[in-house]
Image (spheres, helix red, strand yellow):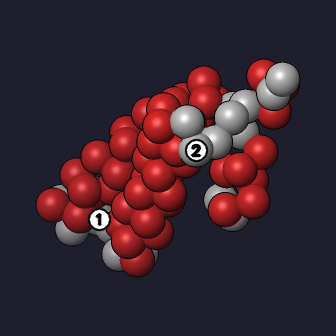
Amino acid sequence: MKRSELNEMSQSELDVKLDENMEALQNIRFQKSLQQLENPLQIRHLKKEIAQIKTVIHEYKSGVREEKGSKN
């Protein structure tokens, strides 16, 4: 997912996406432990995307970023 797509998502959508990515990361790590993982770079990609999502969520919580519909 591109950074511009994350910027367009609302905070609730980001929370859902974060949960999905955390679950996907857990599944990929499980596949890695069973040596069934075909592309080990998926782990790096998912971890990077999780970090980006967490950054945007933190910006919402700290007030740096506001949802598009809530501006006064």
Counting from the top left corner in percent of width and height, residue 11 is at: 61, 30
Q: Earlier in the sequence, mark 1 or mark 2?
A: 1
Crowding at mark 2 (Cα within 10 Å: few <14, some 14-19, many 20+): few
| Residue lying furthest left | 33
Crowding at mark 1 (Cα within 10 Å: few <14, some 14-19, many 20+): few
Per the rendering, the mark at residue 70 is: none
The residue located at (72%, 39%) in the rendering is 9
Say which quadrant the N terminus sits in. bottom right
| Residue lying furthest front | 72
Per the rendering, the mark at residue 36 is: 1
Q: Is residue 66 shown to the viewer in this render?
A: yes
Q: CA distance from mark 1 to mark 2?
A: 42 Å
Pick whichever, 35 or 46, lies toward us.
46
**SS for dot 1:** loop
**SS for dot 2:** loop
Q: Is residue 42 shown to the viewer in this render?
A: no
> Which of the 4 quarters of the picture holds residue 13?
top right
Pick whichever, 61 or 6, lies toward us.
61
Q: Say what amino acid the circle numbered 1 marks.
A: Gln
Vertical placement of residue 72 versus 27, above or below: above
The residue located at (29%, 46%) in the rendering is 26
Vertical placement of residue 42 versus 17, above or below: below
Per the rendering, the mark at residue 64 is: 2
The residue located at (18%, 60%) in the rendering is 34
Counting from the top left corner in percent of width and height, residue 62 is at: 47, 37
Counting from the top left corner in percent of width and height, residue 71 is at: 81, 27
Q: Say what amino acid the circle numbered 2 marks.
A: Val
Vertical placement of residue 26 versus 63, above or below: below
The residue located at (84%, 23%) in the rendering is 72
Counting from the top left corner in percent of width and height, residue 14 is at: 58, 36
